[in-house]
Image (tube, rainbow, N blue to C red):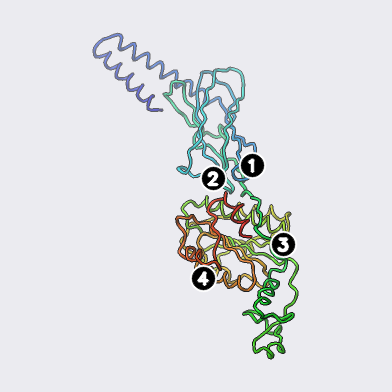
């Protein structure tokens, strides 16, 4: 019962008491008239709730983020007396209070024969993920607004929400320079050593982690420094993308949209260039807490992109102030990695330093930071002043095409 209905009952009772106490017939007639209104409204709503059947439909179950779907509720049955109704919906994946709900009012005329009416409501899919789409509120009410009844009874409305999948949107990337070198590992190192005068034929200076069986002892004895033999690297070295599932931002879903769409767009670009990409989601809650057994997803070609998109829909971001540290990569084999990409909104100083050292060894390294400009972590602000380890700030999905493409 609505406030209007309660007021109507109280007014009817008050007029009846006054009529009996004073003997004024007009007051009694007014009380009876209000009572008839009350009974008519109650009966019309009761009959409609007993005879109407409600079903829900979605025109599509799989869409990209930002696309629009049409949610429809279908009313069928008989209406003996006129009734009205009101539907309130939130877009998929939006928490109450974070967006203005959409609403749809409807009116049903009396009809003694069976009929069916469809009431569509367009919804914009704002966040990636798997969501259950259901009304926040679906109510019937009489034409006077005295009674309001939620339609929640079994088989009168679809009991389970309609499940749908919202995939991250892939943005086209245009690299600022040439594509990544096919021999990004040793080829870049050879160029750097040649420019500094440290290159001798098929050897290079010893680096930490090189096996001793590759040491060129004659060259080392001649120069007084350790040199190792270089062998031809594979034609398309693997690229690694580390995706941090921790989030400093309060709006977790917005950060997840930016990060997952950045990952999807970057992977599609790298794979289109004939390279293999390993996407490794990592959590920062506890040591060794990796998703997918420390493997994540390997994308060898365009045929593997659907697997990656399913993974990006399933990953769960969490709120944490703990930064992504270097120990998250302690078990990752970087010996045959030609490029390393890191997507996080809170890198630690030690991680940025390790990435800088990795870059000096000839590996293509880019750190994408999805934090907002007004809330950058201290290590990121310091790194922005250093051209050697400057991260790329991508705080919104609309910046992906320009900033990510410009960093390649």
Q: Which residue is mark 3?
A: 275
In which quadrant will I find the C terminus?
A: bottom right
| CB under 8 Å between discs 2 and 3 | no
| CB under 8 Å between discs 2 and 1 | no
Q: Secondary structure at mark 1?
A: loop
Q: Which residue is mark 1?
A: 61
Measured Cα–Cα span from mark 2 to mark 1: 14 Å
Measured Cα–Cα span from mark 1 to mark 4: 43 Å
Q: Nearer the viewer, residue 343 or 141?
A: 343
Q: Is residue 208 above or below residue 261?
A: below
Q: Which quadrant of the figure has residue 177? A: bottom right
Closer to viewer: mark 1 or mark 4:
4
| CB under 8 Å between discs 2 and 4 | no
Q: Is residue 242 above or below residue 27?
A: below
- In this rendering, position of residue 222 left or right of residue 43: right
Sequence-wise first label, 2 or 4: 2
Measured Cα–Cα span from mark 3 to mark 4: 28 Å
Q: Secondary structure at mark 4?
A: helix
Q: Which residue is mark 2?
A: 93
Closer to viewer: mark 2 or mark 4:
4
Q: How many marks?
A: 4
Q: Secondary structure at mark 2?
A: loop
Closer to viewer: mark 2 or mark 3:
3
Q: Residues within 10 Å of mark 4 (few under 14, many from 20)?
A: some
């Amino acid at each position: 019962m609505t406030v209007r209905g309660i007021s109507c009952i109280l007014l009817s009772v008050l007029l009846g008491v006054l009529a009996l106490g004073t003997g004024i017939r007009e007051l009694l007639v007014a009380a009876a008239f209000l009572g008839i209104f009350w009974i008519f409204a109650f009966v019309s709503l009761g009959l409609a709730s007993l005879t109407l059947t409600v079903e829900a439909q979605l025109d599509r179950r799989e869409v990209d983020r930002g696309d629009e779907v049409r949610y429809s509720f279908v009313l069928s049955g008989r209406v003996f007396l006129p009734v009205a109704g009101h539907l309130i919906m939130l877009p998929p994946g939006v928490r109450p209070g974070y967006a203005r709900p959409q609403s749809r009012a409807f009116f049903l005329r009396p009809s003694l024969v069976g009929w069916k009416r469809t009431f569509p409501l367009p919804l914009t899919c704002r966040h990636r993920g798997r969501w259950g789409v259901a009304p926040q509120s679906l109510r019937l009410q009489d034409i006077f607004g005295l009674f309001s009844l939620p339609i929640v009874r079994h088989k009168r409305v679809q009991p389970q929400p309609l499940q749908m999948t919202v995939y991250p949107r892939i943005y086209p990337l245009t690299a600022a320079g040439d594509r990544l070198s096919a021999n990004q590992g040793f080829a870049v190192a050879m160029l750097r050593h040649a420019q500094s005068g440290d290159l001798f034929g098929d050897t290079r200076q010893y680096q930490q982690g090189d096996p001793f069986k590759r040491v060129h002892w004659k060259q080392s004895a001649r120069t007084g420094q350790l040199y190792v033999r270089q062998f031809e690297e594979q034609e398309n070295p693997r690229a690694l993308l580390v995706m941090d599932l921790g989030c400093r931002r309060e709006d977790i879903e917005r950060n997840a949209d930016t990060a997952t769409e950045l990952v999807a767009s970057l992977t599609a670009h790298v794979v289109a260039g004939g390279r293999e990409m390993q996407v490794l989601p990592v959590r920062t809650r506890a040591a060794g807490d990796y998703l997918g057994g420390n493997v994540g997803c390997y994308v060898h070609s365009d045929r593997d992109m659907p697997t990656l998109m399913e993974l990006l829909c399933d990953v769960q971001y969490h709120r944490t102030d703990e930064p992504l540290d270097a120990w998250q990569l302690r078990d990752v084999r970087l010996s045959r990695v030609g490029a390393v990409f890191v997507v996080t909104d809170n890198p630690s100083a030690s991680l940025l330093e390790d990435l800088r050292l990795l870059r000096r060894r000839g590996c293509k390294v880019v750190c994408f930071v999805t934090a907002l400009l007004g809330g950058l972590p201290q290590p990121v602000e310091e790194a922005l002043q250093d051209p050697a380890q400057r991260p790329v700030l991508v705080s919104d999905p609309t910046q992906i095409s320009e900033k990510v493409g410009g960093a390649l």
